């Protein structure tokens, strides 16, 4: 059917990826009874109009479960803002710093922003810039403080996802963060060791702040 439709090669790729991502999202939502973050093809990353068009089409397939994953580019900011203007939930990604996520939250107010903390730690370590210890965790906590303040002052409603988590210690260190993306192995490890792990990162955020966030 696509072959006979007169689509160009790039348009056909966009349509095929749309179908594949929609099917993948539907399977995840049905299998686990959860909301699914559904990706747009990377060709949309620099086209705000296509970001809006394809994002809206994806969302309409399953409005109860689909969140549209929009890439963090200048065009993505505009596309995310347009999607949010019609109340379509957006996961704006990939994020790595408080500054990036502050801009995203203030401009587009996506449902979710991210810090990929494991990648930050690995980048620093693998490039011999430093040990990498707590680089991503500190970026995540700094972002959470800013995002929480924006919510409390009603300047944005975004929530923060701590992404690319690797171990149980990070769960305890980031206890005040809104949402975790965490491997099952790390989650199970945390359940076994939670009573042994200190909350937060020493000297980064007072314990009172953690208690305030999680109560």
Image: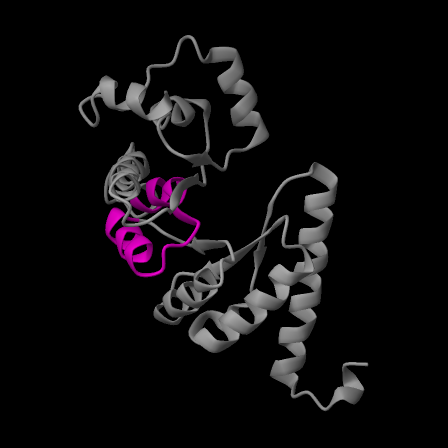
Q: Left or right: 85 with respect to 3?
A: left
Q: Position of residue 34 (x, y in %)?
A: 64, 40
The image shows residue 66, relative to residue 33, as above or below, that is below
Q: Left or right: 15 with respect to 3?
A: left
The image shows residue 195, relative to residue 176, as above or below, that is above
The quadrant of the image that shows the C terminus is top left
Q: How many marks?
A: 0
Q: Which residues are magenta?
A: 97-124
Q: Position of residue 71 (x, y in %)?
A: 45, 62
Res 208 visible: yes
Q: Left or right: 16 with respect to 215?
A: right
Magenta span contains residue 131: no
The image shows residue 172, relative to residue 31, as above or below, that is above
- In this view, the residue farthest toward the top is 195
Say which residue appears at 44% left-offset and 74% top-offset.
48
Say which residue appears at 31% left-offset and 51% top-offset.
101
């Amino acid at each position: 059917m696509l072959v006979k439709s007169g689509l160009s090669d790039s348009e056909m790729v966009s349509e095929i990826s749309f179908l594949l991502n929609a099917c993948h999202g539907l399977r995840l939502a049905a299998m686990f009874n959860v909301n699914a973050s559904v990706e747009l093809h990377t060709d949309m990353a620099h086209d705000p109009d296509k970001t809006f068009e394809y994002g809206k089409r994806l969302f309409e397939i399953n409005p109860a479960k689909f969140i549209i994953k929009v890439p963090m580019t200048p065009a993505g900011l505009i596309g995310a803002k347009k999607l949010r203007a019609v109340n379509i939930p957006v996961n704006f990604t990939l994020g790595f710093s408080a500054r990036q996520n502050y801009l995203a939250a203030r401009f587009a107010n996506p449902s979710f922003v991210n810090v990929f903390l494991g990648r930050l730690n690995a980048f620093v370590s693998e490039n011999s810039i430093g040990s990498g210890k707590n680089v991503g965790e500190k970026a995540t906590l700094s972002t959470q403080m800013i995002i929480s303040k924006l919510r409390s002052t009603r300047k944005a409603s975004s929530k923060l996802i701590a992404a690319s988590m690797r171990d149980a210690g990070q769960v305890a260190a980031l206890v005040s963060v809104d949402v975790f993306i965490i491997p099952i192995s790390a989650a199970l490890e945390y359940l076994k060791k939670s009573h042994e792990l200190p909350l937060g990162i020493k000297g980064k955020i007072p314990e009172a702040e953690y208690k305030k966030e999680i109560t």
